[in-house]
Image (cartoon, helix red, strand yellow):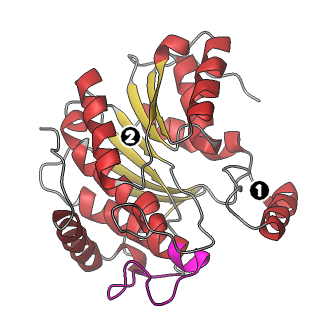
């Protein structure tokens, strides 16, 4: 493993969703060791304590904060956003990793399908409601780690909550395509200085396989032995996005390949439609106050 390099810039404030597992955890520790201040969002308090302990071992415990939050909850996510805003006036980078596969369709307390709520909606909320803090950065950037470049799956416009036909793969693919459109719509905002990067790291030895059936966990672990990238390989480009954000509003990277923004999965009309649909969905829920 290559030793982390010192941060050549002033220390940054970096928010990481899914910051206690896999790639998010590795990125957080590496950035803290480089001198940045990291806010890790995660639902498991034991993993949060372990993250702080590991940061302490590399002399960076004072540069890592853990906020316990179930990001599948809209109001819970908004509480975390308000917590971040109370601690920091500026956020330089928002890195979105949080995802969890659900073999069975389950609902959040707010009545939303959990994969859609966690994998897409939390990223929408963090992107848009941390925007005031990101805009105060000299080089604000959002890195949305999902599946850009894939063309499988679609947004089920007439059944976003997958009430009629749910499967783990259908839910994951829908949320992945929704994240593609999230990036397109975010980058299209006028006078928006924050850069948006859609990044597909490829198959990586990362993440919590606990929710999956035993047979699926075994298959993935065996496949990972032969085909998966290491966590360090997959997060290497993310360091670059943080240290030197792209000059263009939207960038799409599939592993090591820059993608054309003309892909059908990056359709501006679909992005606008999803943004309007998401706003209507959120408006129908009990709302907490966003930061200004």
Looking at the image, residue 207 sits to the left or right of residue 15; the answer is: right
Q: Is residue 219 above or below residue 197?
A: below
Q: Which residue is mark 1?
A: 228
The local crowd at label 1, few if under 14, some if 14 to 19, many if 20 or more residues have their Cα within 10 Å, is: some
Going 40% across and 18% down the picture, which residue do you hit?
Answer: 11
Where in the figure is residue 39, as x and y percent of width and height? 43, 29
Q: Label 2, secondary structure: give it.
A: strand
Q: CA distance from mark 2 to mark 1?
A: 25 Å
Looking at the image, residue 115 sits to the left or right of residue 55; the answer is: left
Q: Nearer the viewer, residue 176 or 164?
A: 164
Q: Is residue 158 magenta?
A: yes
The local crowd at label 2, few if under 14, some if 14 to 19, many if 20 or more residues have their Cα within 10 Å, is: many
Question: Of the residues under marks 2 and 1, which one precedes in the sequence?
Answer: 2
Q: In the current view of this chain or complex, which residue is farthest to the front?
A: 109
Where in the figure is residue 191, as x and y percent of width and height? 12, 49
Q: Is residue 209 magenta?
A: no
Where in the figure is residue 200, as x and y percent of width and height? 55, 59
Residue 289 quadrant = top left
Q: Count of labels shown?
A: 2
Q: Nearer the viewer, residue 200 or 69?
A: 69
> Which stretch is magenta?
153-171
Q: Is residue 216 above or below residue 240?
A: below
Question: On residue 94, which mark appears?
Answer: 2
Quarter occupied by the C terminus: top left
């Amino acid at each position: 493993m290559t030793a982390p390099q010192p941060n050549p810039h002033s220390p940054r404030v970096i928010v990481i969703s899914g910051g206690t597992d896999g790639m998010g955890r590795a990125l957080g520790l590496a950035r803290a060791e480089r001198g940045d201040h990291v806010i890790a969002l995660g639902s498991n308090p034991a993993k949060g304590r372990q993250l702080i302990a590991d940061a302490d071992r590399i002399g960076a415990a004072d540069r890592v904060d853990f906020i316990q939050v179930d990001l599948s909850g809209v109001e819970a996510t908004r509480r975390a956003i308000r917590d971040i805003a109370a601690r920091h006036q500026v956020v330089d980078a928002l890195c979105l990793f949080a995802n969890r596969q659900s073999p069975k369709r389950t609902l959040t307390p707010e009545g939303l399908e959990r994969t859609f709520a966690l994998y897409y909606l939390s990223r929408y909320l963090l992107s848009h409601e941390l925007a005031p803090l990101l805009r105060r950065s000299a080089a604000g950037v959002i890195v949305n780690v999902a599946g850009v470049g894939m063309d499988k799956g679609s947004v089920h416009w007439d059944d976003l909550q997958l009430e009629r036909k749910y499967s783990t793969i259908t839910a994951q693919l829908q949320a992945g395509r929704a994240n593609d459109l999230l990036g397109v719509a975010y980058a299209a905002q006028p006078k928006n200085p924050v850069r948006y990067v859609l990044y597909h790291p490829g198959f990586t030895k990362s993440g919590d396989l606990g929710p999956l059936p035993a047979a699926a966990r075994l298959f993935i672990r065996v496949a990972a032995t032969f085909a998966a990238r290491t966590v360090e390989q997959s997060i290497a480009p993310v360091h670059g996005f943080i240290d030197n954000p792209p000059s263009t509003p939207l960038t799409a990277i599939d592993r090591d390949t820059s993608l054309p923004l003309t892909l059908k999965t990056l359709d501006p009309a679909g992005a606008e439609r999803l943004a309007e649909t998401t706003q209507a969905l959120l408006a129908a829920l009990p709302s907490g106050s966003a930061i200004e």
